Image (cartoon, rainbow, N blue to C red):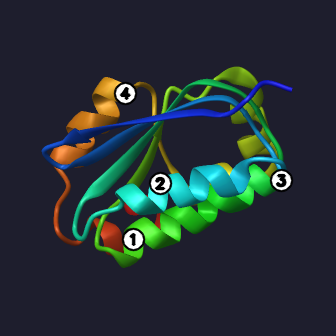
């Protein structure tokens, strides 16, 4: 098992959290608490998943809970640079349609800065 490595960078429109390793039942609470500590009122959040190599059902549940937490604060959660295996899990489970996914971090950060006030109320953040 690959450990979960998290880092955060503050941005003008919110935060960028880089997630690397495996997200599963043994560490999904770590991501949730880490991300919730960095959630700010009215700010967006981008999860850079370029380094995420594995995602299980518990990880999916955390992503949905984070989306709800960020939305409750008036922001939009965006996933960026989702790799093949996690992307496949998101697609197979149908969770992909419930999340806002950008092809790369640059586009996700740009979209976060362009967020309209009503974005947080729309399905999928768009």
Whether residue 36 is situated above or below residue 50 in the rendered picture: below
Q: CA distance from mark 3 to mark 4?
A: 24 Å
Which circle's residue, 1 or 2, is located before the other in the chain? 2
Image spot of residue 97 (x, y percent): 61, 54
Q: Position of residue 89 (x, y in %)?
A: 79, 40
Mark 3 / mark 2, whichever is N-terminal: 2
Q: Residues within 10 Å of mark 2 (few under 14, many from 20)?
A: many
Which is more N-terminal, label 3 or label 1? 3
- The residue depicted at 39 percent of the width and 71 percent of the height is 71
Image x and y of residue 34, in percent: 50, 53
Q: Earlier in the sequence, mark 4 or mark 1?
A: 1
Q: Residues within 10 Å of mark 4 (few under 14, many from 20)?
A: many
Kind of element beneath mark 2:
helix
Q: Nearer the viewer, mark 2 or mark 4?
A: 2
SS category of the residue bearing label 4: helix
Q: Which mark is residue 105?
A: 4
Mark 3 or mark 4: which comes first in sequence?
A: 3
Report the residue marked by disc 2. 35
């Amino acid at each position: 098992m690959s450990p979960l490595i998290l880092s955060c960078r503050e941005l003008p429109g919110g935060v960028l959290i880089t997630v690397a390793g495996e997200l599963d039942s043994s560490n999904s609470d770590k991501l949730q608490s880490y991300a919730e500590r960095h959630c700010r009122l009215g700010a967006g959040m981008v999860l850079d998943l370029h380094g995420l190599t594995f995602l299980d059902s518990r990880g999916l549940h955390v992503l949905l809970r984070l989306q709800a937490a960020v939305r409750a604060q008036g922001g939009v959660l965006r996933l960026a640079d989702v790799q093949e295996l996690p992307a496949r899990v998101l697609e197979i489970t149908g969770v992909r349609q419930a999340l806002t996914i950008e092809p790369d971090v640059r586009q996700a950060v740009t979209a976060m800065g362009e967020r309209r006030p009503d974005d947080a109320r729309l399905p999928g953040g768009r």
